[in-house]
Amino acid sequence: MAQYKSAKVVSNEKIVDGIYKMIVETEIKEAIVPGQFFMLKCWQAEPVLWRPISICEVKEGALVFLYATVGRGTERLAALKKGDQLQVMGPLGNGFDLNNIQGKVALVAGGIGIAPMVELSKRIKGAEVDLYAGFRKDVYAVEDIKPYVNKVHISTEDGSVGHKGYVTEIFDPSAYDLVLCCGPEVMMEKVVKDCLQKGTKIFVSMEKHMACGIGACLVCTCKTKEGNKRTCKEGPVFDGESLVI
Amino acid sequence: MLTREICGVKFKNPVIAASGTFGFGKEYSEFYDVSLLGGICTKGLTIYPKEGNDGIRVVETRAGMLNSVGLQNPGIDAFIQKELPYMEGLQTNIIANVGGNNIEQYMEAVEKLNDTSVHMIELNISCPNVKTGGMAFGIKCEDAYEVVSKVRSVCKKPLIVKLSPNAEDIVAMAVKCREAGADALSLINTIKAMAIDVKKRRPVFHNVTAGLSGPAVKPIALRMVYEVCKAVDIPVIGMGGIMTGQDAVEFIMAGATAIQVGTANFIQPDIGVRIIEEIREFMYKEGIKSIDEIMGAAL
């Protein structure tokens, strides 16, 4: 039976401005697929809802979450200290289909969308993988992915590292068989359009506001050609071709 | 004794999952034995499938949340074929929540449910998130009277009418719905509210307004249930921000026969059974043997 439970914070550190990495000690019996997420909270009554945070890395008896502080929920998470308790519910959602990752593969990430790419890069076997990662200013998580990929391409909006501009400007899908993408909605739309134009298969991990996280409330709907899908249940990973953009 | 009876339908306890927060019971069955609940209200059903609203559908607020789902549902036929057989196996009362764009659609939907296994119908004249129908029937008494009386004339199941806190006069509305033939009332649906995106300088929701629920609305809901229970002699099902057994007991003391739990399901998936346990514990401590002893105690 699915459950939510208490877990203990092992560490929770700011890695760059506005980005935190939290390691949580917990035993999860289910197999965890990169691209899946957990609902997290460290409060009782206020804020009201859990926060969906994607899995960055799975370790022995622990989970790693990489998250951006964007509001009062994630700010509360960021204030957690070693030894503090929080509630975790998951793994939720579908995750990337690891059985169908072959050939030349590009991981394309925008901002905090790089979080699921860490575990994903570790779990891909028998494919040739390159990373494209775009950031506003500070670069993070790339070092964790480097050992598992061939080439790393970076862009920053201020030009401090790599290409000055957006990651979509340095990424050409025609060189790849498969693209796995996570980032802001506008960026993913662009990558999906580029991929479909070049005939490259693409899967994206969508980010939507959620309430229940388990498929009951229908607030995280993603429009697809087969009708509305629940980002928390049928997603967050969708075939780019199925999306209505 | 936690058992309740509403319009001849027996409930094992007064706690019912509220429409739109519990799907068709499947998702929460992964977390606990939902047969422990008194009943489940289905997601709002309409005669035709509905895609729901575009854009952002949820915003958290202080002690609550705004939603603008817009009655996304697979339609009555798909419900009967695909969802109801599963729900029948859940061994709890099934209350079908029904919406519509016009009176004919309400009637047609209810007629389709007449010969199914659902125990009761909850007529939704209170959804604030659809442009036509929904709450449009729940603001003015005469509009509500028309839809309720017409639906009553074709409905073979006990008919609950779900009221909107946005009604012009909640007590007059309750009285009018009873006159029109409602067998029971449930209230409150969400409160019409809004949020503004300060960076975009625009309303967050495509529909501009959305429905507020959660602990923030509880005192308003309680007041409305109290006033309605004073005015009508049919069963009232109270809801609005119920998070604990004590909240539930407050609604019961305000005169509610049963209560619904909505937003709280999102906060704690198994909250329904916890509320049942807390009610039981309260009754034990206070030496109360039956809910009937405290129902309406504060009136």
Image: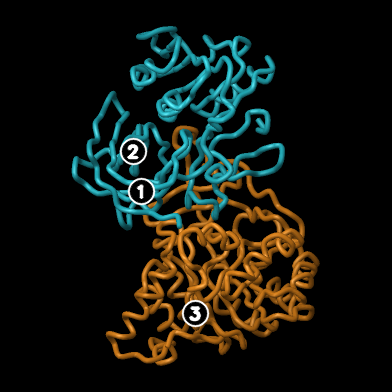
Q: Is mark 2 on a helix, strand or loop?
A: strand
Q: What is the three-letter code of the residue carrying label 3?
A: Ala
Q: What element carries label 1?
A: strand
Q: What residue does disc 2 label?
A: A63
Q: The cyan chain is which one?
A: A
Per the rendering, the mark at residue A88 is 1
How far apart marks 1 and 2 lie (CA) works out to 10 Å
Which residue corresponds to the image point at 44% horizontal and 17% vertical from the top-left?
A: A134
Side of A60 relative to A245 (left or right): left
B84 and B200: which is toward the camera: B84
Q: Position of residue A198 (x, y in %)?
A: 68, 14
Q: Position of residue B190 (x, y in %)?
A: 52, 62
Q: Which colour scheme is used?
A: by chain
Q: Where is residue B60 in the image (x, y as percent from the top left)?
A: 43, 49
Per the rendering, the mark at residue B206 is none
Q: What residue does disc 3 label?
A: B258
Q: Which chain is orange?
A: B
Give the farthest residue toward the front.
Answer: A126
Badge 3, how many Cα within 10 Å: few under 14, some, many 20+?
many
A144 and A76: which is toward the camera: A144
How far apart marks 3 and 2 lie (CA) works out to 42 Å
In primary-sequence order, the first of circles 1 and 2 is 2
Q: Quadrant of residue B273?
A: bottom left
- Residue A18's place in the image compared with B244, above or below, is above
Q: What element carries label 3?
A: strand
Which residue corresponds to the image point at 44% horizontal and 26% vertical from the top-left?
A: A117
Side of A59 relative to A152 (left or right): left
